[in-house]
Amino acid sequence: MDKILRIHMGPDHAPKATTEPIGDYAGFGGRAMTSAVVAKEVPPTCHPLGEDNKLVIAPGLLSGSAAAMSGRLSVGCKSPLTGGIKEANSGGQPAQVLGRLGYAAIILEGRPAEDKLYKVLINKDGVEILPADNLKMLGNYDAVEKLTSEYGDKICCISIGQAGEMKLGAATVACTDMELRPSRHAGRGGVGAVMGSKGVKAIVLDDTGMSMRSPKDPDKFKEANKAFVAGLKQHPVTGQGLPAYGTNVLTNVVNEAGGYPTYNFKIGRFDKAASISGETQAETETARGGKATHGCHRGCVIRCSGTYMDKDGHYLTKQPEYETVWAHGGNCGIDDLDSIAMIDRLDDDFGLDTIEMGATIGVAMDAGLAEFGDAARAIELVREVGKGTPLGRILGSGAGVTGKVFGVERVPVVKNQSMPAYDPRAVQGMGVTYATSTMGADHTAGYAVTANIMGVGGSVDALKPEGQIDLSRDLQIATAAIDSTGMCLFIAFAILDQQETFQALLDMINSFHGLNFTADDVTNLGKTVLKLERDFNEGAGFGPKDDRLPDYFLKEALAPHNITFQVSDQDLDTVFNF
Amino acid sequence: MDKILRIHMGPDHAPKATTEPIGDYAGFGGRAMTSAVVAKEVPPTCHPLGEDNKLVIAPGLLSGSAAAMSGRLSVGCKSPLTGGIKEANSGGQPAQVLGRLGYAAIILEGRPAEDKLYKVLINKDGVEILPADNLKMLGNYDAVEKLTSEYGDKICCISIGQAGEMKLGAATVACTDMELRPSRHAGRGGVGAVMGSKGVKAIVLDDTGMSMRSPKDPDKFKEANKAFVAGLKQHPVTGQGLPAYGTNVLTNVVNEAGGYPTYNFKIGRFDKAASISGETQAETETARGGKATHGCHRGCVIRCSGTYMDKDGHYLTKQPEYETVWAHGGNCGIDDLDSIAMIDRLDDDFGLDTIEMGATIGVAMDAGLAEFGDAARAIELVREVGKGTPLGRILGSGAGVTGKVFGVERVPVVKNQSMPAYDPRAVQGMGVTYATSTMGADHTAGYAVTANIMGVGGSVDALKPEGQIDLSRDLQIATAAIDSTGMCLFIAFAILDQQETFQALLDMINSFHGLNFTADDVTNLGKTVLKLERDFNEGAGFGPKDDRLPDYFLKEALAPHNITFQVSDQDLDTVFNF
C-alpha cells in the first residue's frame, strides 16, 4: 500500500491511469487520506460536479491485513449535497482487496469530454479503463451481476446506480459484500454523484494472486489482534447487542429515551416502534431463513449485518440498519418491516442514501405527496428516483431541495444534509454534532448517543446542554482518528470503555507499521483531520452561521420531554477550540 | 403617509389588521422602508417561508403626489431564493394609490393556522381581510378580473399567481398598471412566495375619495417637478431611447458590445439578435395596433412601456422588457418575438420572474430538457410551472435548484439568484455588482452598464478590471438611495449626467417634505441602507465567499472578446469599504 492510483478522465485526453509513490500522503489512511487529498488538491470553491473536484477512495491503515474490523473504505470529495468536504465510509470487501492490491488510494479526477460511461478494472497486472455504456442506467444489483458474469466471482465492486449517473445529491457509492451484493454504501453527501460526474460506473477489483499484507512484527501483531478481538467480544454492545440484533437494536432504546424522530421530527416517540425493532427484525429474518448475524467483510468479528428474506424466503436485501429502519419507518409513520426492507433494496439498487431518502420522504409527506404511514406510496416515491422522473430527481436531490421545491419549512438538515435517527432536542449531544460537524448533520461524526443514552464512555444528561460541547468535541476528534485508521467505527464502544482494548488497537497499528503511536498521537491525528476539513469548509464559504440547527428545533418543544434544543450559539462556536 | 398598516395573519388568531403611527420609520420610503423593517423585525436566521418572516410593501417618499416618476412600489422580506434580505420593486399603480391612502407601508406578518387564502381590501374607510378561496390557483390575470368584477375598475391590485401560492423561489408580486393589467412585477428573489406563505392572494386598493398628497411648499415643488421632467426629456436615454423602444433598445447595444449572454452564458453575442431587438419589437407592436410608448403608472414621463398584440391584434402582454426578451430569447437561442411575448404573458400570469425563468430554461436546455432555440418546448416548460407539476415546481424554484436537480454545472447565479442580461466577463462592472450586491445577482443594484457601455456617468473600460470596484460601489450606493425615494430607477441616467436634474430631484423632495436634503445626505442614505442590508445578510450567514461569481466565469473565456472575469477576490472584498 505504498502507491496512489490516479484515474484521469479527461476532458483533454482519453481516460488513463497513472500510478505514483504515496509520497506526502504516507501514513494516511481512510478519512485522513481522503480529506488530505481533497484539502490539498481540490479548490474549495469549485463546482462539486465539475472537472476540478476529485473523488478519493481510500482503504484503512490495516486494510488487507489480518487485523479484525479493518475493512472500511473511505470515499471523499467536495460534496454536491453540502458544498463542503465529505468523507463517507462503507463496509464490504473493497477496502481489504484494495489493500492487498497495494493501493493506498484511488483518485478519480477530471471529467470525460463526452457523456460516456466507463469501468475501471484493477488486478495484480495493473489497471484498465474500458467503456461501460452497456451498464448505463442499471441498478447496482444488475450492474454487479453483469460484471460478475464477465469477470468471475473472485472480484469485488465499487459502483454507482442510477442516482449516481443522474448526479443526484443523495447518490451513494456502493461496495459489494462477501456474497457480491452491492449492499454496503458510502452513503452520505452525494459521493455517488461525483463518481457519476467522472463518468465512472464501476471499479472492479480482483486480488487474485496477491497475498495478505504482512506486519513488521508478526508476533506482536498477532497478540495485539487477539487482545483486540477479545475486547470487542467482551463489551456488551459489540459482543452481544450488535451481533444479535444489528444496529436496529437501537430502535427500542432510542424510542424509550424519547429521542426517536417521528413524523418528520414532530414527536420523539413512535407508538408502533415495537413492530420494526431489531428484536422483531431478527426474529423475522431467522424465521424466513435469513441471517440475523453476518459480517459485511472478511475479518469482521462484530457481525452486525444480516440478510433479509422476503415472505417467500428469497433474498430481498441485507438487514436494514437502524438508521434505515428509522428513516423509512418511524420518521414516515411506517411500521411494516417488509416495506422498509423493500425500500432499502431499492435505495441500494438505485444507489441512494437511506437516511437522506427517508428524511426526504418525511418532508414530502409534510408537503402532501403522501400520507404519513402510507408504505405503498413511499415505495412508489422511491421508485420515481430510479426512473429519473422530475419528481424522482427532486426526491433524489435530498430533503433540502425537496423542501425548497415544495415550499416546506420543516426540513431537518444541517449544511443541507439530513439529520439521522436521533432528535437533537432529546439527545442534545447529537445536536451539537449535527450542528458543528464538518460533514453536515451526521451521527457517525461524533456519536454522543454513547454518553447521552447508552452510558458508554461516561454519562452526560441527554436533555441538558451542560457537558454536550465537550462530549461532542471529544467524540468528533476520536471519530476522525478512528475513521482514519479505516477501522469500523463500532470499535469505539469497546475502546471508549476499555483502556486495554484501545491499547490493543495501538499495538496493532504500531506492530504492523513499525511505529510508536501513542494515545496522544491518535488524538492529534483526529485534530489534524478535523482542522484540514474545517479549513476546506471555510474556504468554501462556511462560517459560524452554518454551524446551527434549523430554527424550528429552537422553537418547537419535542414530546414526550417537551424540550427544545438548549445549547447556545456561543457554545456551539467553541467546539473547534482545540 | 404617516401610518403603517400591519396585517397579522395568525396562527394564534384569525387574520386582523392594525394601524400604527409611522414612529421610528418616519422619513423612510421604498427600499429604505422595506430594508429597515426587515432588518429590525425579521430574525436573519428564520425560515423565509416561516411565521417570523415579514413581507413589507412600501411606496416611495413622493408616491401619491404629483411628482413625476414617483410610482415605484418596494417589496421586501427575507428572500426564499437567496436566503438574504430582498427588496424588489415594481411599477404600476399601487404605489401612487397607497400613497394617497396614507400608508407608508403594509407589513404582512405571521401565518394563517390553516391552509387558506385571503384578500385584503383597503380603501378610505379602512381595511378588511376576507377569505379568497375562490381565487385559489388562479393566474394573476384571472384573479384581477374577478376582483375587478367584484370591486369595480377604480381599484388597483397587488397579487400573486400560482407560483406565489406554491411558494416557489421565482414567484413575483404583481401590480396592476393603468389598464388594470397585472403586468408590472416586483420580480426578484421570490417575494411572491413569501406573500403566498402568508396566505394573502391579493391586496385590493381603492383611493376613491382620497386626494393627491400636497407638498409643504407647492410653488417650489411645482417648479422643481417641471425642471425634473425637463431634465428627463432632455437626456438621450430617458428622452429618446426608452420612450421609442423601451428597455429593449439595449439588445443591439449590448449584443454589439459582446456582452449579450447567449446559450446559457456560453458566448457574448447572439447572431439573431436583430430579430428580437427593441427596434423590431416597436415596429411589430405598432403594426399590430399595440403601443410602443406607454407609461406603467400615472405620472410617468419616460413611458418605456408598451403593449404587445398577438398576430390577430388582440392584447397579449405588455411590451416585454429587455431582460425578458434576453432571458427567454437570446439566452435560450430563441429569436421569435411572438414566442417570447407569449412566455412573458405566462410568466406574468403565473407570477414568475422573467429573468429567473429565462436563466432557468437556459440551464434546463443545458440539461437536455429542450434544444436551444426550441421556442415551443420553452413555452411548454413554463406552462409546467403554472400546472404545478414536479417539473414545473423544479423550474419555478429557479436556476440554482434546477441545476442541482439535473446535475448541471453551468448555473449563472450569485447567492442563488440568476444573473440578468449582461455577461460579467464582457461588462466587468456588472460582474462586481452581481458578486457583491446584497440582493444576489441583480443588474438594478448597481447598473455599471452606464459607464461600461453607454458612456453615461463617465466611462470605464468594460473589459478591464480597473475602476470597476469604485464604479459599482458608487452605483450601488446611488441606487439604494434612488430605490429609497421610490422613484423609477431610470431617472438615474439623467441625474448621473445632469447636475441640474439631480438638484431638481432634491428640490422636489425638500419642497414636498420641508427638508434640506443635500447630495451628501442622499449618499449617506444609500450607504445606510446598504449597511443595514449587509448586516442582515451577515446575520443570515453570508460571508466574503458569497460575494463571488461561479467558478466558470473565472475559467472560461467568453467570445467574441475571449475574456474571463478579471476582478480579483481581494478587490471584491473592498466594495463595502465605505
Image (cartoon, coloured by chain):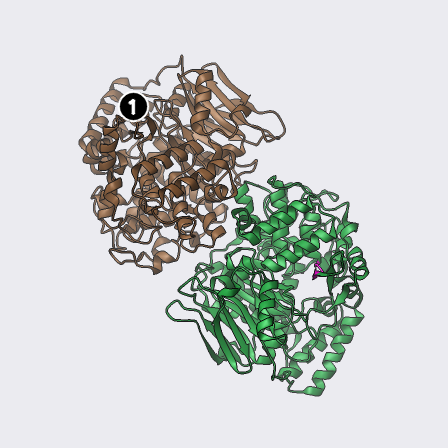
Chain colours: A brown, B green
Residue at horizontal 35 percent and vertical 58 percent from the top? A554
Report the amino acid beneath label 1. Answer: Gly
Please give the count of numbered marks on the rendered protein.
Answer: 1
Q: Position of residue B28 (x, y in %)?
A: 56, 75
Residue A340 lies, with reference to residue B472, above or below; the image says above
Horizontal side of residue A365 vs B362, given as left or right: left
Residue A378 shown in magenta = no
Q: Position of residue A94 (x, y in %)?
A: 39, 24
Q: Chain of mark 1?
A: A
The image quarter in which residue A100 lies: top left
Near mark 1 (Cα within 10 A), the count class, few <14, some 14-19 or many ≥20, is: some
Q: Position of residue B529 (x, y in %)?
A: 56, 68
Q: Nearer the viewer, residue B552 or B385?
A: B385
Residue A35 lies, with reference to residue A534, above or below; the image says above
Horizontal side of residue B389 vs A71, given as left or right: right
- SS for callout 1: loop
Q: Nearer the viewer, residue B217 or A282?
A: A282
Q: Nearer the viewer, residue A116 or A463?
A: A116
Horizontal side of residue A330 vs A238, given as left or right: right
Query: Where is the C terminus of chain B found, in terms of image quarters?
Result: bottom right
Q: Where is mark 1, residue-wise?
A: A299
Q: Residue furthest top?
A: A209
Q: Is residue B161 visible?
A: yes
Q: Nearer the viewer, residue A352 or A513?
A: A352
- Magenta residues? B316-321
Q: Is residue A414 visible?
A: no
Horizontal side of residue A136 vs B243, given as left or right: left
